[in-house]
Image (tube, rainbow, N blue to C red):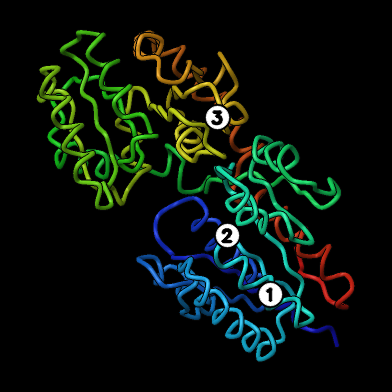
Amino acid sequence: MQKQPTILQIIPELGPGGAEQGCIDVGAALVRAGAKAIVVSHGGSRLHELARTGVQHINMPVHSKNPLTILMNSARLQKIIKKYDVDIVHVRSRAPAWSAYLACRKTNAHFMTTCHAPYNIGGEMKRHYNSIMTKGERIIAISNMVADYMQMNYRLNPHNIRLVHRGVAIDRFNPNAVSAERVITLATQWRIPDGSNVVMLPGRLTRWKGHHVLIDAIARLQRKDIFCIIIGSDQGRSAYRQELEDKIAEKDLSGQIRIVDHCSDMPAAYMLAGAVVSASIEPEGFGRIPIEAQAMGRPIIATDHGGAQETIVRGETGWLVPPSDSEYMAEAIKEALALNPEQRDILAERAMEHIAENFSVDLMIHKTLGVYNELLADHGTQIQI
């Protein structure tokens, strides 16, 4: 009788974010495929989502970068690997990766990683700390940009790298799945003036997300018909939020730009947008906003670097503009809002088809489980894909 495959994923915390979403999606797929799925984390706001899928959760302080805690976590992970006869340990962050690597060396479990970003190197100590993500028997890169970063900065066997782009849930991020009532609810809650051209920037309030560039772009347009919504929590960065609020007031845009902390219905939010902006001033390893916006058929304007270059078809499904350039961004917003209904429909069709073919969550899961099966070959078991 074939052994039931057991996959242990490790992530610091289950909060908002693409890495966390991927962990939850893969865990749910493993359960559906008849495998045993375990997630180790320090908890978080999305534990209920994990529980709903049937994935077992084990709480551990794997978010900690304290060397002593990392060693203690390694001992704990060894016990878990042996108790549940874990076949593969899949880690998505550096601190827990060190614990898992040490644990796997003392057990029969395979060790693999997903690299989500081009980490800053800084010095030899930081280079060594980051290098743990390159020690997996298989290393998933979420974009070509991340794969190139690893190849350039570390001596890797290219055979061990697998490209698996993040995916969006097409059934949820679909214009036809969003009722008018949901859209009206958000428009009322956010007090959007009737007839406004809505420009939207989703993204947590941290400087590298480029909110200040968008504010400058809106100021350049000098159009009273534009209403801009910035969606994102400051996660304790109250000084940066205040800086943005001060900049909005300084530009005399308090009646046209609103910052909202959180949105639990992003598909409905996208339906309000005449244009969606991803203004990151530093390259993102992938970036969820461009694929979600395209899946919803919305015009997307993103900065011309990082993962956005791989997910947006320049001139066909969206605009790519130079980083930190409010003038180019303003021009792209102007062009997006000027699309007539026929042009908007053509762009939406292209964008939705592009995402369905290349960046669906189903495709991401299929490829990830395929990587697991590569490692499971010597364990006499496979996951049914």
Residue 132, picture quadrant:
bottom right
Indicate the amino acid at tag 3.
Ala
Look at the numbered discs 2 and 3 and tell me whether their residues touch, using CB distance below 8 Å. Answer: no
Looking at the image, is mark 3 or mark 1 earlier in the sequence?
1
Disc 3: which residue? 308
| Residue 40, placed above or below residue 236 | below
Q: Which mark is residue 94?
A: 2
Residue type at tag 1: Leu
CA distance separating discs 2 and 3: 24 Å
Q: Which residue is mark 1?
A: 102
- Residue 22, label in figure: none
Q: Residues within 10 Å of mark 1 (few under 14, many from 20)?
A: some
Circle 2 packing at 10 Å, graded few (<14), some (14-19), many (20+), is many
Badge 3: residue crowd in 10 Å (few <14, some 14–19, many ≥20): many
Q: Which is nearer the eye, 338 or 36?
A: 36
Question: At numbered mark 1, what does the secondary structure look like: helix, strand or loop?
Answer: helix
Residue at image location 52% in from the left, 49% down from the top: 169
Q: Nearer the viewer, mark 3 or mark 1?
A: 1
Q: Earlier in the sequence, mark 2 or mark 3?
A: 2
Disc 3 on helix, strand or loop? helix
